Image (cartoon, rainbow, N blue to C red):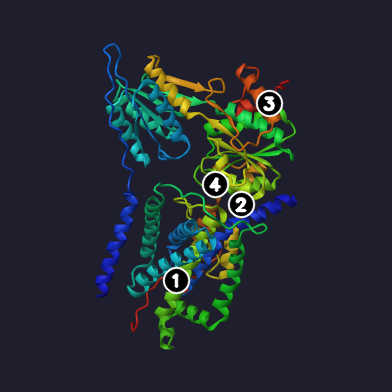
Amino acid sequence: MWTILSILFMATIRSATPLIFSALGGTFSEKSGVVNIGLDGMMTVGAFSAVLLSYKTGSPWLGLLGAAVAGGLFGLLLAFLSVNFKANQTVVGVAINILAAGLTTFLLVGIWGKPGQTPNVEYFQPWGPFNIFTYIAIALVGISYFVLYKTPFGLRVRAVGEHPAAADTLGIDVYKMRYICVIISGILAGLGGASLSIGSISLFKEGMVAGRGFIALAAMIFGKWHPIGAALACLFFGFADALQTISMTLGLKLPKEFLYALPYILTMLAVSGLIGKAVAPAADGVPYEKGKR
Amino acid sequence: MLKRVLVLLLVLTLVFAGFTGCAPQPAPTEPTPQPTPTEPTKPVLSFGMVTDVGGLGDQSFNDSAWAGLQKAGTELSVEPKVLQSTKQDEYVPNLGSLAGTVDLSVAVGFLFEDAMKTAADQYGDKKFGAIDISTDLAKANVMQVNFKEHEGSFLVGVIAGMTTKSNVVGFVGGMDFPLIQRFQVGFEAGVASVNPKAKVLVNYTGAFDNPDKGKEVALTQFQQKADVIFHASGACGIGVIQAADEKGFWAIGVDQDQAAVSKNNKVLCSMIKRVDVGTYTIAKAYADNTFKGGVVELGLKEEGVGYSDGGNNLTPELKEAAEKYKTAIIEGKVVVPVTIDDMKAFKPVEIK
């Protein structure tokens, strides 16, 4: 019994790690009032850049940096289109996902000359039971909570997300705050992608993110736009995943199809609001126009 | 100004998105058909193959199939043709256009089932070879070669059963369907034959292309004390072997010798499937005029399956035991189960 619990625990944490990064990213972006549907695409470019940099330099640390930069650039793109141009944030997010999938597939063939997957690269060997990403993720949950709720910066972020006009009259630069938060969001999602490609395994494969960006988005909503809530929700989804893996070896007589679908079913339940009422920041998804009443 | 920038950005986005659809396709290598010296008594031979999405250079399935055809080509002094598929949508057109130019077209992989049916009807006067299509298409012009994966898996099961110290071994499958279940039951039967006390943990990842899932499953099995894990899960196996490298248990490779995949030489052995023997058999039957439609199964006896020791990890005792069981299977003393129901009725036979 004790072994099973410990297996379940470790598998839960491992599955939750990439989700935590992206869910925290989503929290930053949406707290400031920008919906980030593009998390999945940002994870994809993060995963790809991490492998590319590690492949070229032989250092997974530079891979980590590359993932953060690539994710951040995609965040910048989202910020540019949705803050400056007031484009529909959902549409821009979807465009980012498509762009990321297309761009990585294109570069994969361009760089390695073969579609599908890259060769193995240097990656982060596990330290103790987990790899380095898990420890970073746990630390980031605390840091995000502190930044968003205990610092003047966090107060401004939340103000901009709730009532940008009021924040503006008090002299807070709404655009700047949103830019910063969306870029942070991209950086975090990029790291989440890297935790798959140079943490869990050591290569990039088309479609390897497998909708995790959307699951992270669901976790953020389920966690009520709060860093700690979002992290707990990620653990919950990780648990569903771990349960799926382990129930087969335990010989539970559940249909396999149901087990494969379990994490996604839970995601739908969470997003459809069946579990508790979730309230988004008031100005979430609404572009801010200066001087408009 | 801003509008212009926006338009520019949109155009860029579209251009990039367009790349998804048209990743540069490797120019299909179409070797110029060598003018075969035709003797009036002999018919002109011509054959070729269509790869699946893996393409040539996959160091696995397609390369192996191509090697078999090339061997036949050299013997018969015919230059075989090859058409590469980069997407599944290309299976039907590729197979059709190949059949339009050569007499015998070979396709590899079970995903060709529908394409094969279409092409075989369309080109009723041409001959076709298929590897791994398990359903009997019942076409007079299609020769199907399948493998007795259960027999090869049995032998690696024997090796795993003798190697395990914890008496727990693992099996990681890709998708849960009859072809992959053959690997599972063959393996289970092999383990049970030499080590009745050993428990076999069975997991299916639900995919063939998800290495991190493969690794996760292998780590879970390792935590449940498995110390030898056999995978039949395509690219998920990369994750299984990586987990073996990290944790120090043994992995058993599949289809090809996978010793090179492991950094720390933790691939105990590999269950190999001689796709080259398959394509060679088809080409040979065609050249000898013994070609006929239907399913041919290649097992240990035909050297269609077997095991390999690319990492030099097998001790003489292990090899000896595997060879003993190999002989017993070929002589029919051991009947390896094929389905999960067969496995339930399987009684281990001890071979002295």
Q: Label 3: which residue? A: B320
Q: Disc 1 marks which amino acid? A: Ile
Q: Disc 4 marks which amino acid? A: Tyr
Q: Label 2: which residue? A: A242
Foreground label between 1 and 4: 1
Task: Report how far apart the C-alphas of labels 3 and 2 lie in the structure.
Answer: 40 Å
Residue B200 at x, y = what percent?
67, 37
Q: Label 1: which residue? A: A183
Residue B185 at x, y = what percent?
61, 30
Q: Secondary structure at mark 1?
A: helix
Q: Disc 3 marks which amino acid? A: Glu
Q: Label 4: which residue? A: A260
Which is nearer the N-term, disc 2 or disc 4?
2
Q: Is circle 1 on the same chain as circle 2?
A: yes
For the residues bearing labels 2 and 4, Cβ distance under 8 angstroms: no
Does residue A26 appear in this view? yes
Chain under callout 4:
A
Chain under callout 2:
A
